[in-house]
Amino acid sequence: MTNIGSYEERLKNFSWSIAEKELGYSDAKTKNIGWYCSDRICDMGKAEKTALIWEGHDGTEKRYSFNDLRLASNTIGKFLKNLGLKNEDRVCLFMDKIPELYFSFLGVLKIGAIVQPLFSAFGDESLHVRLENAETSVIITQRKHVSKVRRILEKSPYLKHIVIVDYDGKHPLREREIAFNLEETVPVEEFEIFPTKAESPSVLHYTSGTTGQPKGVKHVHYSLISQYLTTKWVLDLIEDSLLGQEEDIYWCTADPGWVTGTSYGIIGPWSMGITQCVLDKGFSAENWYQFIEKYNITVWYSAPTAIRSLMKAGDEIVRKFNLSSLRHLASVGEPLNAEAVIWSEKIYGLPFLDTYWQTETGSIMITNFPGMPIRPGSMGKPFPGIVGTVVDTKTYEPITTPGTIGLIAFKPGWPAMMRSYWNNEETYQSKFKNGWYIPGDRARLDDEGYFWFVGRDDDIINTAGHLVSPFEVESALLEAEQVAESAVVSKPDEINMEVVKAFVTLKPGFEPTPDNELTIMNFIRKKLSPLAMPQEIEFVKTLPKTRSGKIMRRLLHAREWGEDIGDTSTLEDEE
Amino acid sequence: MSEEMKDIILNYVIEEYLEDEDEEISYDTPLISGGIVDSFSMVSLKRFLENKYNISIPDDRATPEAFDSVTKITVLVDGFLK
């Protein structure tokens, strides 16, 4: 028995009001996600139920109940309010996967402010452009990341406070810095949660674009409706003992710096009152299997890159651990290849079910549902309430012939859909064609309505499930003292699906040496992020350009992927 | 195992990957599982070792386990120098 039951029946009788009713949404005294994920669960008599089991890289374990979650988010909320923050101010969370990150997420929402989670491995420039775009007034961070904030402080006048959650007093605090230690602060029992409405802004996640700077994807508190129901029906989480079944212990491996880590690593499970585990430790197959065994994890939501890394680690290591607690596996971030689905079924006795969605959609759109016949390698079918199809790349009309490649398209209007790009209405509007929202991915539909992923429709690089803009990397490369010109494309990778590759021409006086390659790699790693760092740099004398001088990235991409290079009649000078 | 090599690698890790100026690491501090070096950054650390010691480390030997401490990295590099 699954939560969704019959997919076909759900399609016939679907309405988002199912989630609204289950959540008591219309009668709720507040429509605030922070309240839904903590106070409401306590009000339901589950205050002492474990909400979070956290394990750090040194093996330290911490457990928090839903009441702890409520108190911690109240306490952070009050602290922020005392700093003078008001509703709709932007608060950036720039932390590793420590408990304060999760509590702060809810605390920021409780005061009606907008939470801006950023991946803590971002370098100075990546951090700066995102804070500047959002005009973020507060950043909450850790001691280990504060040096990055200090380096951009002069050019960040809007940033009023830098909150350090683990200040140890060894060095004096600097300009705008303030210490906040949750464990040493008196918990706030009563807190007036800001009366956000369904359409009040909630989360601002940044995503890369083909051209220009990253875009801030604005979500609202009503996103909860999609996130709750997709968590329940797709991740199939069970919040109460039912027919003798045990309650689930859930593990979402995503970092809340990315949308999966908030939609399904915070909002979805906690709005259901689910116990979830967080491992703040680098990846290794042994660590992960040990974690599943130790906490009896039942539902595991991970990413194809991790699954392929586990495949690479081999079958033998799996046998060292008791993974019998697992009952449901799902995957997100990039297309899940058929081999990984077949392998997981063989080795864990369960297939990883692919889920397709993106930062802008806010919740799962297309998926293989529990109980549905799986077609390994397929994306599955649209979630009930989601009208999805494949449209022609020029006319944007739905394609009626099965097997024809086109663009994935959705009818706008589901609850978790983005409401805008921050200060970028023009780009937001460009995502809609002929009444469809176009996510920018190509796919085909088969004769039974299953979607099959083909690829991106633009130059964006999807590396380990994270989108990297070639434009952003090229721009940063030009700031390296050695680089004259650059072109950045994706290159196939067995584990990460794609990685960043740069073609570079050097300034006079610099030689194409291995040391220069390493220096440039490290320059990008620190400036942007390890994800954006080219895994390979090819030094060339010239870059292929059109007669008008535009670098032909398409040509370089085709070379890397062994594809037909297409029409080169406009090429200025082939190398 | 060369102590000099261990120091060179340790200093490189401190210089390039350690963000917290107060954090002290030793030859045996977990680098990958400890979150100091992530899997993407491991590529640049591998490149450093290859350049410095004029070796080539195959991808299947450059595992998170083999790169998880300065001591383990030194053992790996030593194996390619012999």
Image: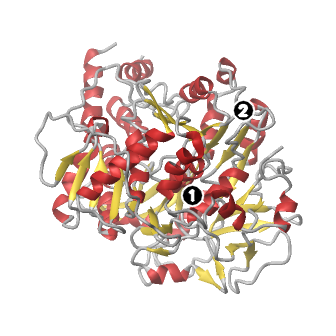
Q: Which residue is at the front of the view, A219 or A22? A: A22
Q: Position of residue A104 (x, y in %)?
A: 38, 49
Q: Tell me the amino acid under the disc marked 2.
A: Glu
Determine crowd level at label 2: few under 14, some 14-19, many 20+ residues with C-alpha closer than 10 A. Answer: few
From what the image shows, is residue A387 above or below residue A7?
below
Whichever of callouts 1 and 2 sits on the residue coming sooner in the sequence is 2
Q: Position of residue A416 (x, y in %)?
A: 59, 66
Nearer to us: label 1 or label 2: 2
Do the residues indicated by labels 1 and 2 lie within the same chain of the protein?
yes
Q: Position of residue A196 (x, y in %)?
A: 45, 67
Residue A560 tag number: 1
Q: Tell me the amino acid under the disc marked 1.
A: Glu
Mark 1 residue element: helix
Residue B34 located left or right of residue A82: right
- For image coordinates 63% across by 84% down, the residue present is A433
Q: Which residue is at the front of the view, A260 or A455? A: A260
- Whether residue A365 is visible here, answered yes or no, is no
From what the image shows, is residue A447 above or below residue A268?
below
Give the residue pinned by disc 2. A246
- For image coordinates 44% across by 66% down, the residue present is A195
Q: Residue A310's image quarter?
A: top right
Mark 2 residue element: loop
Q: Residue A290's image quarter?
A: top right
Which chain is mark 2 on? A
Quadrant, the N terminus of chain A? top right
From what the image shows, is residue A8 above or below residue A349?
below
Which chain is mark 1 on? A
Determine crowd level at label 1: few under 14, some 14-19, many 20+ residues with C-alpha closer than 10 A. Answer: some
Q: Which residue is at the front of the view, A379 or A177? A: A177
Q: Which residue is at the front of the view, A536 or A217? A: A217
Q: Position of residue A540 (x, y in %)?
A: 41, 60
Q: Are marks 1 and 2 in contact (CB under 8 Å)?
A: no
